[in-house]
């Protein structure tokens, strides 16, 4: 009998915490709100927005903290090696018209796999938009998810099935060690659509899609402008600090996300004349950031008159680090040897080789994960054979610590560089 994706897999279980740890190391902050909305003791479908290619399911895996069955577009399964690893990761292909009309019938088997997982209590995750989008805007939702939900609920009778909206908001899609805000909305009970689903399936599918669209827009930063998208997005960053003061919120990843979300909602109420003025302000702010080579997310944290105390804090941190390195200089070769991969700018490889900017973060993650894992295992085996198991274990622990701590040091150095650029240009502008 063919093994289902929902069945227990020992290798998957062993690698699951490693993948979660690697995802945690890949980001500066992952802030989650609304986790209590996940119906842990019931069957549910996770419906995230699709903002950042393969990084979206990795973030979802880290948030939910349990094995999940994913459905993904079929074109990424074309190569046999990719198909093997994606299947091992509990990802099943979904076929679209662009894959060929003759392939669409294969979705029946895929949907059966999804229903089996849900009936066993294993969460199912489908990217609600069907394709990734490099804008903070929700695309039209695909209907496949709702057909799976309706058919599964019919098989489950009165046992509840829920669709859980999940909003993902990245400071930066491409740059490593950015921050992510995850907003989990109230679950949608599929049972309430079943009378209509049985009598008039297309109408019920549209009702589910409309309700999930509204729910997802509440959990993301929905930029309403199309033609002036970049201007509105920049305006939100330009006025983040001011809005935080108005809302009496302290500046952190989550509250800055709420602030940008609030600003776009307020802009949706303005007339065209006022909007045009605000778009000009956003465009001017974006130009300043480009001139100073500082990203919008950094400028929204420390706007025009960057706080000297913040920069001083980072310099003190660096001085303490340098002092520690001086006192423990004899340990530095072992620290570097334990995991040199973290010092290699692999994101530049992804930037040079990958055309789609949204896939660059995923490729960078894959390179670092595979190279670090192989290096640490080989180092452990070789050092154990040469100097003994205890020193081999010590190097293994150092390698894991380096994977966690070195990115944090990189972030500090990056913020100092951005801060110096901002203040240098500010000083020149005043002359």
Image: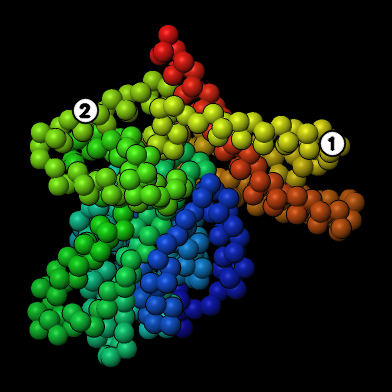
Q: Is residue 163 above or below residue 286?
A: below
Query: How far from the left and from the top, in percent, is residue 261?
Result: 30, 49
Q: Secondary structure at mark 2?
A: helix
For mark 2, does the 10 Å Cα neighbourhood hold few (<14), some (14 to 19), or many (20 or more) residues? Answer: some
Give the residue drawn at x 75%, y 45%: 338
Q: Residue at position x 55%, y 34% from top?
A: 310
Seen in the image, is 159 located left or right of residue 411?
A: left
Dot 1 crowding, Cα within 10 Å, few <14, some 14–19, many 20+ = few
Q: Residue at x 44, y 19 (%)?
A: 426
Alpha-carbon span between mark 2 and mark 1? 53 Å
The residue where tag 2 is placed is 280
Evaluate whether residue 215 shows in this view. Answer: yes
Query: How far from the left and from the top, in percent, is residue 66?
Result: 50, 71
Give left or right: position of 331 versus 155: right
Quarter-wise, where is residue 244 in the image?
top left
Taking the image as shown, residue 203 lies to the left or right of residue 193, namely left
Tags 2 and 1 touching, CB below 8 Å:
no
**Residue at the bottom extreme?**
158
Considering the image in quadrants, where does the C terminus appear? top left
Marking on residue 34: none
Q: Nearer the viewer, residue 298 or 17?
A: 298
Q: What percent of the width, then of the height, locates residue 33? A: 42, 62
Residue identified by numbered label 1: 327
Image height check: is 394 above or below 426? below
Question: Residue, x 36% and y 68% (percent of image)?
Answer: 46
Q: Does label 2 or label 1 sit earlier along the sequence?
A: 2
Task: Give the tally of numbered discs.
Answer: 2
Q: As rendered, which of 426 and 382 lies closer to the eye?
A: 426
183 or 270, which is in the foreground? 270
Say which quarter of the image contains residue 6.
bottom left
**Image check: 29 left or right of 97?**
right
- Circle 1 sits in a helix, a strand or a loop, which is it? helix
């Amino acid at each position: 009998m063919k093994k289902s994706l929902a069945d227990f897999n020992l290798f998957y279980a062993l690698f699951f915490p490693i993948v979660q740890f690697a995802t945690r190391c890949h980001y500066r902050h992952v802030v989650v709100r609304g986790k209590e909305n996940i119906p842990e003791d019931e069957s549910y479908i996770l419906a995230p927005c699709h903002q950042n290619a393969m990084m979206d399911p990795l973030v979802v895996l880290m948030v939910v903290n349990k094995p999940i069955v994913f459905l993904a577009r079929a074109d990424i399964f074309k190569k046999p090696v990719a198909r093997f690893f994606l299947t091992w990761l509990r990802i099943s292909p979904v076929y679209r018209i662009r894959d060929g009309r003759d392939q669409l019938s294969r979705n029946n088997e895929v949907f059966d796999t999804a229903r089996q997982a849900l009936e066993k209590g294993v969460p199912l995750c489908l990217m609600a938009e069907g394709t990734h989008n490099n804008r903070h805007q929700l695309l039209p939702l695909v209907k496949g998810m709702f057909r799976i939900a309706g058919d599964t609920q019919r098989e489950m009778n009165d046992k509840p099935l829920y669709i859980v909206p999940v909003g993902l908001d990245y400071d930066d899609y491409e740059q490593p060690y950015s921050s992510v805000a995850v907003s989990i909305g109230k679950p949608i009970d599929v049972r309430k659509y079943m009378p209509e689903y049985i009598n008039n399936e297309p109408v019920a599918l549209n009702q589910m899609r409309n309700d999930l669209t509204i729910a997802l827009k509440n959990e993301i930063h929905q930029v309403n402008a199309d033609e002036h998208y970049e201007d509105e997005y920049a305006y939100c960053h330009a006025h983040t600090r001011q809005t935080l003061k108005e809302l009496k919120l302290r500046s952190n990843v989550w509250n800055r996300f709420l602030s940008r979300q609030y600003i776009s909602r307020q802009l949706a109420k303005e007339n065209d004349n006022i909007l045009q003025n605000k778009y000009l302000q956003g465009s001017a702010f974006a130009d300043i950031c480009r001139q100073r080579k500082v990203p919008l997310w950094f400028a929204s944290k420390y706007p025009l008159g960057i706080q000297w105390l913040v920069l001083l804090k980072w310099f003190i941190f660096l001085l303490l680090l340098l002092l520690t390195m001086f006192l423990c200089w004899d340990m530095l070769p072992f620290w570097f040897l334990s995991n040199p991969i973290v010092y290699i700018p692999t994101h530049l490889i992804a930037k040079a080789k990958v055309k789609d900017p949204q896939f660059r973060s995923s490729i960078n993650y894959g390179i670092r994960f595979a190279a670090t894992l192989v290096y640490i295992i080989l180092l452990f085996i070789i050092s154990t054979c040469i100097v003994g198991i205890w020193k081999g274990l010590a190097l293994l622990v150092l390698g894991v610590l380096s994977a966690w701590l070195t990115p944090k040091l990189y972030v500090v150095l990056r913020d100092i560089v951005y801060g110096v650029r901002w203040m240098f240009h500010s000083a020149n502008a005043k002359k």
